[in-house]
Amino acid sequence: MAKGGFRGGFPGGNQMNMVRQAQKMQQDFLKMQQELEATNFEFSSGGGAVKATITGTRELSAIEIKPEVVDPDDVEMLQDLILAAVNGALKLSDEKTSQSMAKLQGGMGGLPGLF
């Protein structure tokens, strides 16, 4: 070993930059998570006959059904409209989460492979 100890490898400044970058990313992630959790996602089906709202924590918070779509002789149609509205709201939530994660990961040039 060279006199004075190990001198190769990672310069101290580079390590500190990586630590700072990781800490900033963690803060950004937590902020993004809080923003998503506070968001409501709405989706309508049947031309607005049924509207489902879910929270950012993926809980169904509301279902609105227009009275004219309630037909006792066609319950299947109402069930289909409800499923379409709920699944649409869930898909919107997933897409927004994916977009937010992609933005966050886009700033990760110096820390590959973390996600």
Image (cartoon, rainbow, N blue to C red):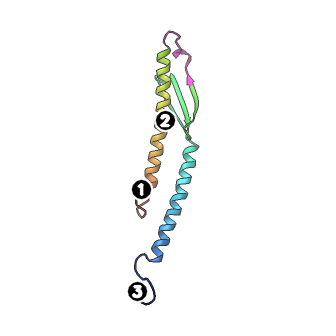
Q: Is residue 89 above or below residue 38?
A: above
Give SS at disc 1.
helix
Give SS at disc 3.
loop
Look at discs 1 and 2 and give the one toward the viewer.
Answer: 2
Coordinates of residue 54 in the picture (x, y in percent) = 55, 35
Give SS at disc 2.
helix
Front-most of residues 2 and 46: 2
User: If you read the primary sequence from the N terminus, does the residue marked by circle 2 or circle 3 appear first?
Assistant: 3
User: If you read the primary sequence from the N terminus, does the residue marked by circle 1 or circle 2 appear first?
Assistant: 2
Mark 3 burial class by Cα count in 10 Å: few <14, some 14-19, many 20+: few
Magenta residues span 64-74
Residue occupying the point 47% across, 72% down: 15
Look at discs 1 and 3 and give the one toward the viewer.
Answer: 3
The amino acid marked with disc number 1 is Gly
C-alpha gap between disc 2 and disc 3: 59 Å
Residue occupying the point 56% across, 53% down: 31
* Residue wearing tag 1: 106
The amino acid marked with disc number 3 is Met
* Residue wearing tag 2: 90
* Residue wearing tag 3: 1
Q: Quadrant of the C terminus?
A: bottom left
C-alpha gap between disc 1 and disc 2: 24 Å
Name the side, left or right, on which 56 lies relative to 8: right
Q: Is residue 87 above or below residue 31?
A: above
